[in-house]
Image (cartoon, helix red, strand yellow):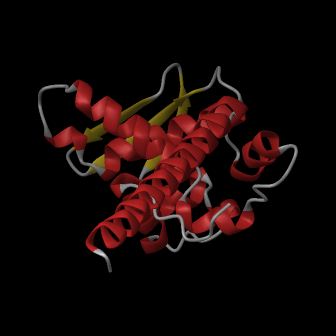
Amino acid sequence: MRTDYIGNYLEQKASQYLRTLNIRLPSDLNIERICTLENLDYRLGNASSYIVVNEYRLITINKQKTPKQQHFEFLHELSHNHFDHHKYLARCDNFEQEACHFSLYLAVPIHMFQFINFESDNLVQEVSDLFNIPEEIAYQRLQNIFDNCNYYNIFFTRKKNIRSNRRSYYGN
């Protein structure tokens, strides 16, 4: 895996957000710590949701889910908090899409790639365990990372080829 992975805008924003909270290690990505840092209340309930009443902010997580699912659902609801989606009266599908992407990037942030052995034969399971997320989420995030790496590799390879072709065409 390349160590110079940049990621897209939301990936960078998720990583920066966590760094501003001084969340530097995978073990720092725990619900209680984040709630304390963000002045959020957290409870288990019958469904996952993000609720704001005046200055009071509450995240409820479905108690029927596994601990890894609960952790990821918390990150999803935290994404709504981060983007202040509660300030807009109309529910917008774009908010859900934005929260889905952002929670994926919060779950495995760029600045924690150093803790991942991308060459492992059990990569999905190890990422799932390290970041306390379901295996399907770990797989989805890893696929996203590798797709972005391939895109950047292809893009920059093509760009280099264009430059070298231009030089040979112009005799430089």
Decide if residue 51 is in sight here.
yes
Residue depicted at x 81% and y 55%:
119
**Which quarter of the rendering shows the N terminus?**
bottom right
Q: Nearer the viewer, residue 6 or 114?
A: 6
Q: Is residue 108 above or below residue 76?
A: below
Percent x, y of residue 29? 61, 57
Check the image and name the residue furthest to the left.
89
109 relative to 170 in the view: left or right: right
In the foreground, 118 or 132:
118
Residue 87 left/right relative to 35 = left
What residue is shown at x 24% (from left), y 47% (from top)? 84
The image position of residue 99, as x and y in percent, is: 37, 38
Up the image or down, 91 lies above or below 71; here it is above
User: Residue 114 appears at what percent x and percent y?
Assistant: 69, 69
Quadrant for the C terminus in the image = bottom left
**Toward the viewer: 163 or 146?**
163
Pinpoint residue 68: horizontal percent, then vertical percent: 69, 36
